[in-house]
Amino acid sequence: MNAGRPELNGTVGAVSSTHWLASGTAMAILEKGGNAFDAVTAAGFVLQVVEPHYNGLGGDVSVLAYKAADRRTTAVCGQGPMPRTATPGHFHALGLRQIPGSGLLPAVVPGAMSAWMRLLGEYGSLPLRDVLDAAIGYATDGFPLLPDTARAIQVLAPLFRTEWAESGRTYLQGGEAPRAGARFRNSALAGTYQRLLREAETASSDREAQIAAAENAFYQGFVAEAVDAFTSGAAVLDATGRKHHGLLTGQDMATWRATIDAPALLTYGNLAVHKPGPWSQGPVFLQQLALLGGFDLRAMGLGSAEYIHTVAECAKLAFADREAWYGDPAHSDVPLDTLLSPAYTAARRELVGSKAAMDLRPGSPDGRQPWIPVQQPDELPPADSEWMAQMHSGLPTIVQATAARGDTCTIAVADRHGNLVVAVPSGGWLKSSPVVPGLGFSLGTRGQTMSLAEGHPNSLAPGRRPRTTLSPTLVLRDGEPYLAFGTPGGDRQDQWTLGFHLAVTEFGLDLQSAVGTLAFHTDHFPSSFTPHESRPGVLVVEENCDPSTVDALRRRGHEVELAPAFSLGKVCAVGVDPEHRFLRAAASPRGSLAYAVGR
């Protein structure tokens, strides 16, 4: 499906994101003379304003960047850690077996601001004012409210009126939920951006010093002070049906900054495929790709039963390893080199049979014994209202009776200088936590992805980063920039983007055709989000799949669940045409919101 959209080609820049206003902002920055890193940062701040149900200034972001001047790819980790006082014992003392998915208990250090400032300061070129201008404008003057945002506010309105008062002041209009398409403003968030900029410009006339000053104002200044006062002074209703104080403090914020690291890497033929490290789920993409390298996918045919079966079975193996072995590498010994090694991959590939596997089968890298903690659900109060039922799920989206989910945002940019960058922002969504008084944004609740069982790479520990689902991809071909892409979708990101990647690299589709190919995924493994449910053997396929293919998959033992046609994921992609060096862009037609721009 391409819905009449062509692949866009140009020479000035290529942009794709999950919201047309963010895409337009990024292209405006490129036309102003900024580079890809200026553009992606400006768009990232706009996404905080126009998609508050999927991300915010209090959330997190994962970025992959190829800087042409250095011919080097790096990963910017905008995943903040758990507070210093966050221990399994604290949660057990509250009578909890899981970290709840909403409220203040799962709040982590906001990572997005530091990550954007690191990227902008070290790789960008424009002043901070130019980069924040569009976000300030939309927050001040308003923007058309998306249907999904309006739906989220409508469902949560009783909570906002009775418990989360600051969220009510931010999102309700005259005490009522605004309608889709209404002009919506967030004056408190605009004020936060403006004060960050004002303090930055007061501190110095130097560009880099201003960026550092804005970061300090957030993590050591008025933002951290407001967060500290809120989390220590208020007990907030959460998914447990009880009120709890938060653990995050201003000191936690003051002592953390985003890092720029070497990404995880898999060489696949003439392609160098980069992902964020095992503090994210990113390496599962590489593990899947390595496993699939031993199969003749082209002979199977794109979208055939054999192709879908093989891809799904490899996903089960890779995600089983995610559950057993991934976590913050600064606190755990993650055997990533072995997990990606040819010998380990070959042994795992032998497990792929002609029938669907029903067990979760993690491997034993270097002879280690795998362990996947069992997440015991808490006994929650009856959900006697829709808003409480929604709080029981840690997912950002308003959960409906469909397999289609949005969950987060994506922005990818390629520029005329040869730079390539892709970011997946999330966290701090309006459903997760109350708006911090005076700041206009909520805190991120990524702590819910951790286990209270001690001794696992993703076990809760003070200062440890929770394993995030945010997973951009950046690919070089013969050492040159080739593709950068991402999608919303939580745990499913590295299945939907893998389908796109294979459509381009194995089957030769152009980017726009590839983002519209049949999407599918397995929910075989535990969800990262509270209450961490899994659905062994379930294979979700869009209903536009050929019925004979669905029948063949069921004969192989898959429990096939049909999702609405063209509903899974919203892949956004940019790249460089290796023959003519044109910059390319494409955006998924799913959801009718993602938008690509090329010039």
Image: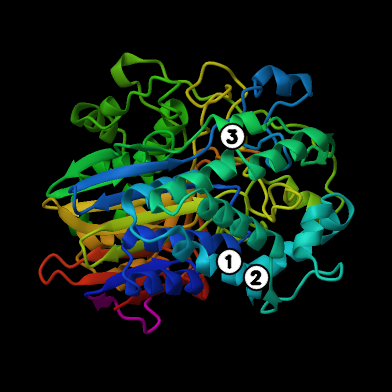
**Which residue position holds label 1?**
136
Main SS, magenta residues: loop
| SS of the residue under disc 3 | helix
Q: Residues within 10 Å of mark 3 (few under 14, many from 20)?
A: many
Q: Residue furthest right?
A: 162
Inspect this view and state whether residue 2 appears: yes
Report the Cα–Cα distance between label 1 and label 3.
Answer: 24 Å
Where residue 326 appears, as percent x and y from the top left, is: 43, 30
Three-letter residue code for mark 3:
Met
Where residue 433 appears, as percent x and y from the top left, is: 71, 46
| SS of the residue under disc 1 | helix
- Residue 366 placement: quadrant: top left
- Confirm whether the magenta stretch covers residue 272: no
Question: Tag on residue 214?
Answer: none
**Which residue position holds label 2?**
140
- Residue 233 placement: quadrant: top right
Question: Tag on residue 253?
Answer: 3
Picture residue at 58% right of the left edge, 24% below the top: 460
Q: Are marks 1 and 3 in contact (CB under 8 Å)?
A: no
Q: Are marks 1 and 2 in contact (CB under 8 Å)?
A: yes
Query: Which of the two discs, 1 and 3, labels the residue nearer the N terminus?
Result: 1
Q: Which residues are magenta?
A: 1-10
Please tell me how many numbered marks the rendered image carries: 3
